[in-house]
Image (cartoon, rainbow, N blue to C red):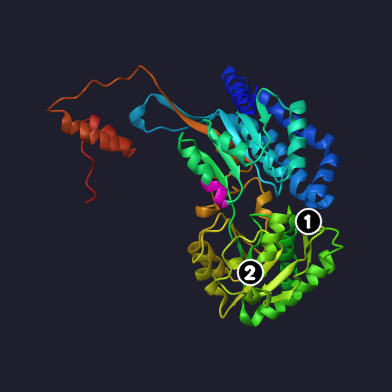
Amino acid sequence: MNADQEMRRSVEELRLTFKTGKTRTVGWRKAQLRAILRLIHENENTLFHLLQSELGKHPVESYRDEIGVVKKSVDHALNCIDQWMSPKKGRLPLVYFPASRQVLPEPLGVVLIIASWNFPIALTLDPLIGAISAGNTVVLKPSELSPNCASFLANILPSYLDPKAVKVIEGGREVSNQLLQYKWDKIFFTGSTKVGKIVMAAAANNLTPVTLELGGKCPAIFDFLPNSDLKVAAKRVASGKWGPCAGQAGIGIDYMLVEQKFASTVIEQLKKTIKRFYGDDAKNFKNLSKIINKGHFDRLRSFLEDSAVANCIVYGGSFDDTSLIIEPTILLDPPLDAEIMNEEIFGPLLPIITMDNIEESIEFINSKPKPLAIYAFTKNENFKKRILAETSSGSVTFNDTVIQFLCDELPFGGVGQSGIGRYHGKYSFDTFSHEKAVLERSFYFELEPWHPPWNNFKLQFLRLVYNYDYVGMLLLLLGLKRPSNS
């Protein structure tokens, strides 16, 4: 059996499994979720090793951004799944009396999840948690750019999860393209905007709904802050820019906007924070992830090959070709038409753009595609209101960075070029569910068709029904008129 036949057979097996109805039961869903918890618990050290060797992630970073994220998501789903699955009942207009209505969540069917390489465990298993919670069967396609993690998941998942309901298919671009040719009930993709367009175009052939978790150039607005707040803000910027996979995160800070008169103060505080967090020797960083591969490493280095950009470096700029480590680097006012300011950086380079008035940042952000996130450090309440009212982004976080990703009670997703759809917590369940509208009427209280001269009476009666005017309905039925207000 060749690879294409094997892939087709796997997808067909998932479809047959879904038709049996077993994935719809709450018992099956909870059993799979608990199995994911066991997988994480029993293989934690292996995951630490894989993430360290493949991405250079320190175990603390791996737990914070990968293992802990999965555990948190599973625990939340297990605690809430009974409520999520319950039909939602509510009132109906009186015109339907006697009747009842409910909204019934049902699984979509067979779904495809294409994961990203920068968080190869969390961004593969977190959407899977939502798909399983909603009762679907799933094909997981891990990224070929993190092959060790992909092979681990392909080998280990069948030992924990129902192999007839969840399958892992490894491979590169050709495999992804082949998978996209099949008819799915949902496609969930995490990755670049460029590939997201390909996914969406393929999905359109079968009218398949998609969730696209993309990225973009996420700005951080840095308003004037007193010294004590400045130190805290600098720590949070450093954590949000260089902490998650050395800046290789769609939700990470891409560039900063600062007032000209405040820029030198901000830069000096960032320098102190970088040295404290990571040291100042690019060959001996102990807690900074490496760049995923030589291709991405060279892409980042090419940003600085423009002499006009290189001249803007105010901190860092060192590269270690052997370990694929790039030092945290700060640039002050690089040319706005440079490549670094027009492509998502996805690495540890931080341009700082200055302006006369920080409120000009709103216009600057609006001149670019809608970002996945906006981070704003300010104590100015009116400025906060303007940011919320006058900009569009997947999310806005005030006075911190990245933490919105960890909140199950908030939807995570982009808008415009930064993505389509949302997930996390209940939003993940909803993403992989269809909300079926159910209305049931009784055979009692059937009104006969009205003919002239009753049409005017019928029109008046319907107006009163739709306006819930019970007094008016009673008066109309009794042949009385409502007393005049005069």
Q: Which mark is residue 289?
A: 1
Going by the numbered disc 1, the residue's amino acid type is Ser
Depicted 329 relative to depicted 436: above or below: below
Q: Identify the residue position indicated by label 2 in the image.
A: 256
The answer to if 194 sits in the magenta stretch is: yes
Q: Would residue 151 be visible to someone looking at this image?
A: yes
Depicted 314 relative to depicted 38: above or below: below
Q: Quadrant of the N terminus?
A: top right
Q: Are marks 1 and 2 in contact (CB under 8 Å)?
A: no
Q: Nearer the viewer, residue 318 or 129?
A: 318
Which of marks 2 and 1 precedes in the sequence? Answer: 2
Q: Using the rendered view, name the quadrant where residue 374 is placed.
A: bottom right
Q: Report the side of 243 relative to 481 (left or right).
A: right
Q: Report the side of 180 relative to 154 (left or right).
A: left
Q: Nearer the viewer, residue 21 or 286?
A: 286
Q: Residues within 10 Å of mark 2 (few under 14, many from 20)?
A: many
Going by the numbered disc 2, the residue's amino acid type is Met
Check disc 1 and report its element: helix, strand or loop: loop
> Picture coordinates of residue 85 (x, y %)?
59, 30
Q: Nearer the viewer, residue 399 or 216?
A: 216
Check disc 2 and report its element: helix, strand or loop: strand
Depicted 358 relative to depicted 367: above or below: below
Query: What secondary structure prevails in the magenta region?
Result: helix
Q: Which residues are magenta?
A: 193-197
The residue depicted at 60 percent of the width and 31 percent of the height is: 134
> Picture coordinates of residue 47 (x, y %)?
81, 42
> Picture coordinates of residue 386 (x, y %)?
51, 67
